[in-house]
Each structure stands twice: as structure tokens, then as C-alpha cells.
Image (tube, rainbow, N blue to C red):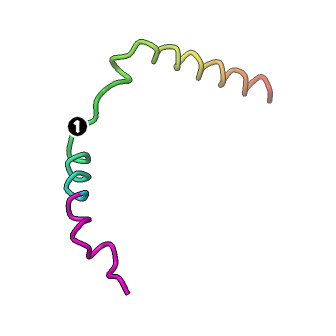
Amino acid sequence: MAPPQNVAPETCEPDKDVLAALNAPPEPRWEDEEPSSEAYEFDDARVTTDVVSE
């Protein structure tokens, strides 16, 4: 029987990549892009539609 993947030495390398990705600060894309304002307008329209449907 093969050993569990958790014990396999091959998983040690990806773990480092995962930790690096988790430790890396997220890129604030939403704040930089202008289309975010359109998303807010879309959300408002959905909220209004939900209220009217009720």
C-alpha cells in the first residue's frame, strides 16, 4: 500500500507555494478598476427589483 499523500515528500514543495500565496498580500483589483461602480448600480437594481416583486 502506498503511503498517504500527506507523508509524501512531494507535497512539501507545493505546501511552500501555498504558504507563500497565503502570506502574499492580495491585489486590490476591485478598488483600482472603475467597473466596480457598475457592480454597485447592478446590486441596487437587484435590491429594488426584489422589493418590488414582494
Residue at the (26%, 52%) spot, across then down: 18
Q: Which residue is mark 1?
A: 25
Front residue of 17 and 35: 17
5 in relation to 31, above or below: below
Q: Nearer the viewer, residue 9 or 35?
A: 9
Judge whether residue 7 is colored magenta. Answer: yes
Specify start and end residues of the magenta stretch as a single range. 1-13
Going by the image, does 20 lie left or right of 37?
Answer: left
Extreme-front residue of the structure: 1
28 over 21 or under it: above or below: above
Q: Determine whether the residue tagged by mark 1 lies in a helix, strand or loop.
A: loop
Q: Is residue 45 above or below residue 10?
A: above
Q: Nearer the viewer, residue 43 or 1?
A: 1
Q: Position of residue 52 (x, y in %)?
A: 77, 22
Identity, as a three-letter code, of the amino acid under mark 1: Pro
Quadrant in which residue 33 is drawn = top left
